[in-house]
Image (cartoon, helix red, strand yellow):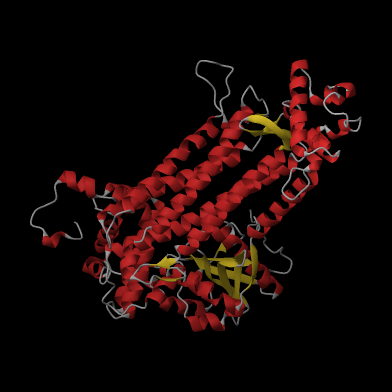
Amino acid sequence: MALWGGRFSQAADTRFKQFNDSLRFDYRLAEQDIVGSIAWSKALRQVNVLSEEEQQRLELALNELKLAVMEDPSQILQSDAEDIHSWVEQQLIGKVGDLGKKLHTGRSRNDQVATDLKLWCRQQGQQLLLMLDHLQNQLVTVARVHQATVLPGYTHLQRAQPVTFAHWCLAYVEMFERDYSRLQDALSRLDTCPLGSGALAGTAYPIDREVLAHSLGFHRATRNSLDSVSDRDHVMELLSTASISMLHLSRMAEDLIFYNSGESNFIELADTVTSGSSLMPQKKNPDALELIRGKCGRVYGSLAGMMMTVKALPLAYNKDMQEDKEGLFDALDTWHECMEMAALCFDGIKVNKDRTLEAAMQGYSNATELADYLVAKGIPFREAHHIVGVAVVAAIKKGCALEELSLEEMRAFSPVIDVDVYPILTIESCLEKRCALGGVAPNQVDHAIGQAEKRLEKRYSPGVKVRGARLTDLDAIEGMVAYWAGLGENLPRMRNELVRDIGSFAVAEHHGTVTGCASLYVYDSGLAEIRSLGIEAGWQQQGQGRAVVDHLVEKAAQMAIKKVFVLTRVPEFFMKQGFVPTSKSLLPEKVMKDCDRCPRQHACDEVALEVRLDQEQQIPTVSVA
């Protein structure tokens, strides 16, 4: 059933329905649509559109639906619903009856889809930042190994001056550093919540949109309802960032393809990223790199298509905007996949150092050094440039390198040339002379690698940093607790509770930003409970939760607590850290009283687990990768 059928007396033509429907691609927004719907149900409760009991029933049903979607997203595609919003509403009505029809009060699909898409972009953006980190770390690691590997530098695809393979790697580290910065900026600008903007003029209910925005983890609410539902700048910014980064990936791929060719023979790629020929058994083709180069075009196409779609749209929402998703999904998927493959190409790469050195010594790449030598002897550079050009012609005719010309032959070009010219013309001298910041001199390359390592370590570390919470972390903790409580994973906590218990909380931190939290609640009996475990959207599967739990277990051991327990719907997560199942009947009575606040109290699926911390027992530890 469509969400808009009352105005129409005839059914839509099946061909139009197929043309109009978007479920085949916007099903990827299912989790975001459900999360947004839970937040909206709470907002409706605050303005008395829903009763407490109605809101809890809706929240429970939506959480059940979210779990089902996470287990099998493909089930959505079996529906004939128009879009993901219709599908979620239909499923909700199927669970709670007519109550499900009340959820859309004051909300439009226009602000709904804008919110869903921003939630998705925010989560995907964090994963892309991590992949950029991984690629840069891979390049820096290779650079460290190949600091002394000489490589010919090129201009116009002609050998120009010698560089090193490390210096080449660092050039791309800088490119991806700019991509990282652009992505961060884009994610910062999209961190505003459109929900509550209605179709275009705002909602007729006195919703506190700032509270609503914070409950979904956004920095603030959007400021103008017309702009909110028609803004797709964040889509174009992400596509632009992806396009520029794909350009960098494509250039890097082209360099490596050239270096891998039989004519260059500078590198050999691992078998894991190459393929063979169906006809010629000797071939080993750099298919991974060629595909990276080739996929660049489809990302550009998505950006161009989106800009053309938006360029003449009047305010506010128009159906044209449905075209924002397919290109965005494909482009960001492609970008992520290409970065992952690019990093893989450096696994097992072999650099033919003898061949790169030989090539660097050819092509008269030390001609500039001879010109500088003449300048040091008092000859104006333009005159020195001409003299060296004549010398190169003579060397070419003789079929030798500049340094292979005899002193007598050298002096024929200029009487100021003496025997001290030969040390100047060595590869080592060519490199060492480029000693200004950013140059290819060994000390500069070593400095650049060190600086890159420090930047990456400061920005991202595989080890998660965990510390005790501070009052300045309160907003971040409140947002995460509210988010996961909205999903039914935790009990809701009032702000005054969080202020009171701030000393019991620990937070995971990423470059100054709180990415996860949990608290250790101590009972009179000497037991302790891990509560309010939550991870910021986009940071799941990155070791944040494991690190926070490990920190709290160690804290409990230091307090001489003998047993820590947890009530959870994801027992596998805790069992990996040494927790074992226990009976709820063995838990303190105060724990069970908390269940009165839970919307799932009549359909509880939480499991009780515990870990013992007797003094003779080793404290469980977690390896965070």
> 259 or 287: which is nearer to us?
259
> 564 or 540: which is nearer to us?
540
The answer to whether residue 395 shows anywhere in this view is: yes
Left or right of 575 on screen, residue 537: left
Residue 473, given in percent of the width and then of the height, sits at: 57, 75
Left or right of 18 on screen, residue 189: right
Residue 585, given in percent of the width and then of the height, sits at: 50, 72
> 6 or 175: which is nearer to us?
175
Taking the spot 68% from the left edge, 46% from the top edge, the residue there is: 140
The answer to whether residue 64 shows anywhere in this view is: no
Taking the spot 46% from the left edge, 38% from the top edge, the residue there is: 295
Examine the rendered structure and indicate whether residue 251 appears above or below residue 597: above
Examine the rendered structure and indicate whether residue 103 appears above or below residue 446: below
Residue 614, given in percent of the width and then of the height, sits at: 69, 69
Determine which quarter of the picture holds residue 512. Answer: bottom right
Determine which quarter of the picture holds residue 392. Answer: top right
**Which corner quadrant holds the N terminus?**
bottom left
Examine the rendered structure and indicate whether residue 377 appears above or below residue 528: above
Taking the spot 14% from the left edge, 47% from the top edge, the residue there is: 13
Residue 388, given in percent of the width and then of the height, sits at: 77, 29
Left or right of 251 on screen, residue 415: right
